[in-house]
Image: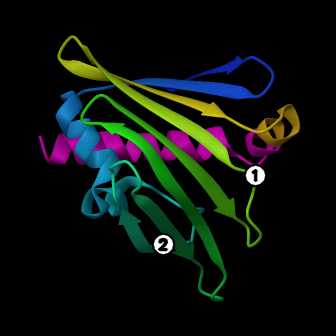
Amino acid sequence: MLTQVTREGASSLVLTRRLEATPARVWDALTRAGLLTRWMLGPPGWPMVRCQFAAKAGGLMHVEWSDRMGRTLTLTGEVIEAEPPWRMLHVERLHLPDPSPENVVETLLAPDGTGTRLMLHMTFPDPAARDEMLAGGLVEGMEESFVRLETVLAEDG
């Protein structure tokens, strides 16, 4: 299933996708470093070289990709609230190398038949920041990662 993308309000995006796994398994894949490294893709030719994620209130995230020239792309953030396996609220910044404006992400998981409905509600500081992320390939990159996530969930199922 393709990810559904909806613009909401002036500066938000909602991404929705159905995954064929229980909410607990999806939660683990979204929050455990050993699983994140298997599906959370960076740009082509940029393998993940660091992954730390503490999925609890106050926990930190640091994910880093690097290319052969030694350039890095880094995602950092903090978890504000976590209610495993249903909901997480966190703030993230993409470093290119300078940090992007903060993006507030609410992740919601809900049972959906034999699977789970994943919804990411992303709120950017303003419409320009949202549009810049869209123009930079955010949705396409997430779609590729979600396809890989489905593969990981099927392999571990």
Q: Secondary structure at mark 1?
A: loop
Which amino acid type is shown beneath numbered disc 1?
Pro
Q: Position of residue 82 (x, y in %)?
A: 34, 39
Q: Which residue is mark 2?
A: 47
> Hey, which residue is sitting farthest right in the picture?
128
Instruction: Please report whichever mark, 2 or 1, sits nearer to the chain's N-terminal start.
Output: 2
148 is within the stretch colored magenta: yes
Dominant SS in magenta = helix
In this rendering, position of residue 157 left or right of residue 63: left
Q: Position of residue 59 (x, y in %)?
A: 39, 57
Above or below: residue 97 compared with residue 19: below
Q: Position of residue 103 (x, y in %)?
A: 65, 44
At a point 60% along the width and 80% down the height, the residue shown is 67
Q: Position of residue 93 (x, y in %)?
A: 64, 56
**Badge 2 density bin: few <14, some 14–19, many ≥20, Cα 10 Å:** some
Q: Nearer the viewer, residue 105 or 1?
A: 105
Q: Quadrant of the C terminus?
A: top left
What's the magenta region? 132-157
At a point 44% along the width and 61% down the height, the residue shown is 60
Q: Nearer the viewer, residue 38 or 78?
A: 78
Q: Quadrant of residue 88?
A: top left
At a point 17% along the width and 17% down the height, the residue shown is 114
Which amino acid type is shown beneath numbered disc 2?
Pro
User: Which disc number belongs to residue 101?
Assistant: 1
